[in-house]
Image (cartoon, grey):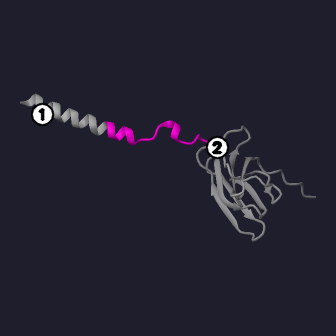
């Protein structure tokens, strides 16, 4: 008596599985994978950029906790970012039509400022700052 029930359940399971498999499209029915945009007319270049990078000490070690300041040269607005443990910083969603100046410092160590201008059309700018001690003051006469 259990054998007929087992046979019936098995038969129902096989029929259901075959129906599910029959409804799934074969790999030939799918379009080939493409990278990039096939229709360049619809793609608009991004008007935003990302500036990222690393702050290093004189021995080329990453500097955690360094302050990287980003200054918008149009509005003079300044944004600070403290570097992570790996010395990295990141500024996102910055406009391509604005000039920026970046400075990195930690304590009395500082790096020379770097500018990212409107003429640099990259959407991702990678910078490396190298912290240096301040230049000795000129002798007083």
Mark 2 lies on a secondary structure that is loop
Locate the N terminus and report the quarter of the image it occupies.
top left
Q: Nearer the viewer, residue 80 or 98?
A: 98
Describe residue 115's horizontal placement relative to residue 43 as left or right: right
Q: Is residue 23 magenta?
A: yes
Depth check, front residue: 140 or 116: 116
Q: Residue at x 59, y 41 (%)?
A: 33
10 Å neighbourhood of mark 1: few (<14), some, or many (≥20)?
Answer: few
44 or 3: nearer the viewer:
3
- The residue at which mark 1 appears reads as 5
Q: CA distance from mark 2 to mark 1?
A: 52 Å
Compared to residue 71, the image places residue 132 above or below, namely: above
**Residue furthest left in the image:** 1
Q: Measuring 89% from the left and 54% from the top, which residue is drawn there?
A: 139
Vertical placement of residue 22 versus 137, above or below: above
Q: Position of residue 63 (x, y in %)?
A: 65, 45
Q: Position of residue 129 (x, y in %)?
A: 74, 47
Snapshot quadrant of residue 73: bottom right
Q: Is residue 21 a member of the stretch shown in magenta?
A: yes
- The residue that disc 2 covers is 35
What segment carries the magenta color?
18-33
Residue 12, position as x, y percentages in the image: 22, 37
Q: Residue furthest top?
A: 3
Q: Which mark is residue 33?
A: none
């Amino acid at each position: 008596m259990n054998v007929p029930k087992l046979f019936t359940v098995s038969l129902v399971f096989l029929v259901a599985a075959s129906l599910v498999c029959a409804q799934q499209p074969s790999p030939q029915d799918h379009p080939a994978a493409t990278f990039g945009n096939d229709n360049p007319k619809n793609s608009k270049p991004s008007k935003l950029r990302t500036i990222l990078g690393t702050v290093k000490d004189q021995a080329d070690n990453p500097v955690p906790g360094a302050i990287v300041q980003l200054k918008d040269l149009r509005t003079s607005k300044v944004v600070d970012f403290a570097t992570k443990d790996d010395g990295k910083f990141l500024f996102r969603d910055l406009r391509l039509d604005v000039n920026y100046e970046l400075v990195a410092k930690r304590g009395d160590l500082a790096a020379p400022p770097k500018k990212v201008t409107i003429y640099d059309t990259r959407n991702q700018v990678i910078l490396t700052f190298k912290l240096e001690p301040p230049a000795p003051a000129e002798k007083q006469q």
